[in-house]
Image: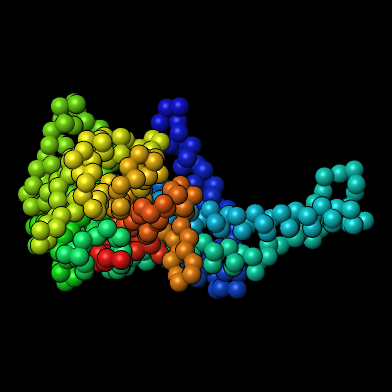
Amino acid sequence: MNKLIIIPLAALLFLVVDWYVLQALKTAMQHFSGPTQRVLIYAHWSVTAVTLVAFFLYHFAPTDLLGPRLRMGIMVGLFINYLSKTLVVVVLLVDDLIRLGKWVASRFQEKSVDTQSNAIPRNAIPRSEFLAKTAMVVGAIPVVSLTWGIISGAHDYRVRRVKLVLKNLPRSFDGLKIAQLSDIHSGSFFNKTAVKGGVEMLLAEKPDVVFFTGDLVNNRADEVRDYLPIFEKVRAPLGVFSTLGNHDYGDYAAWESETAKRQNLQNLMQAHKLLGWNLMMDTHTTLKQNGDEIAIIGIQNWGSGRWPKYGNLAKAYAGAEDFPVKLLLSHDPSHWDAQVRPEFPGIDVQFAGHTHGMQFGIEIPGFRWSPAQYVYKQWAGMYEQGGQRLYVNRGYGYLGYPGRVGILPEITIFELKTV
């Protein structure tokens, strides 16, 4: 259907939702003074007006007029606004169903009403003030939590420490410290000072080696330009090893030509070089300590289902078979079940990212939940099966929603231990 039809229809739906929400607002504030009620009603419709103007600008204004960050801000504002109002509507519908039931019962009980007419009973059934106030409270929850997730959660970096016991680990590597970053998504950042603070937290851990498991940008290589001076500080004595994620290939952007898209990938690979990171494109290398060696294998993005399969693990693995420990950098955790475990049982650990834990959920001792678990079998933390392990980093950055609620950005510090 034509956008000129869809967008006005969507705007009309928004207006209906806003009118419906206003009914709850009027009931909830019925004890307020008249001037206060008028101010709140004007404020309600003012927010609606601003939201609808932004909605039309997003869809009809030239892309270069708004810019990517303003466009993202508009969509996030729309999402938070109408998510909260949808929850209000759900509670109001419960109230209206109760009122409908009472009204139907009153039709049978009201003896004075002519049963042959369509007259409404004399005593109208009012909205429940309790449910109206409940609706407003329920609607406020996503506004408060998602706004706080932007203000605080987006850059509330947490260091997670993991002891990684490997049965064939040479003694020379006992105590080796690996730091993992993933999913930087530099095109989404809005607080450079906070991003720098996260890097300083990583460096304070003094890792021996650093792994970066993909998605340096959202789509375009130039997104990372302003952050090169920050991330080039990520260094370690044994090096920084990196791979590509699904967003690094520019598959989700509009390009004027295939040549431009290919050049973007070349520019991204050059960015890894400028950062001083060793980008692994279906290759393997070794870490050496006192004459002992373990293998690091890094492949391009490979995911099951709809996710792109650019990587070639067989190519990267060839020649690494005889090393006592093999550590794989592969962005997408779905790779583990789809190919790593069934075809490459010699790989000890896969380091992944990709899911971000959907940037929303609950993680407390003894319990964790996120919508991510309904999409990904492995979505955050450590998994083990058949002697092989997978670690899914929750990501350093964010995508779409510029914040995090419950699932906070992660810097992982692994300590390798012998049995």
Q: Residue at x 84, y 55 (%)?
A: 105
Task: Determine whether, in the image, residue 391 is placed left or right of residue 298.
Answer: right
Q: Which residue is drawn at 37% across and 59% down?
A: 382
Is residue 273 or residue 44 the one in the foreground?
Answer: 273
Q: With respect to residue 88, does 214 lie above or below?
A: above
User: Based on the displayed image, in which of its 4 quarters is residue 5 positioned?
Assistant: top left
Q: With respect to residue 376, does 394 lie above or below?
A: below
Q: Residue at x 50, y 47 (%)?
A: 15
Q: With respect to residue 238, does 306 lie above or below?
A: above
Snapshot colouring: rainbow
Task: Determine whether, in the image, residue 92 is placed left or right of residue 212.
Answer: right
Whole-percent x and y of residue 158?
29, 68
Residue located farthest toward the right when viewing the structure as drawn: 111
Instruction: Residue 155: tell me if it is visible.
Output: no
User: Based on the displayed image, in which of its 4 quarters is residue 143 positioned?
Assistant: bottom left
Instruction: Residue 3: tell me if it is visible.
Output: yes
Number of disc labels:
0
- Viewport quadrant of the N terminus: top left
Whole-percent x and y of residue 219?
23, 41
Is residue 4 or residue 278 the one in the foreground?
Answer: 278
- Viewport quadrant of the C terminus: bottom left
Whole-percent x and y of residue 20?
58, 53
Task: Determine whether, in the image, residue 236 is placed left or right of residue 364.
Answer: left
Q: Which residue is drawn at 59% across and 67% down?
A: 133
Whole-percent x and y of residue 279?
14, 46
Is residue 309 or residue 195 the one in the foreground?
Answer: 309
Is residue 74 or residue 141 the one in the foreground?
Answer: 141
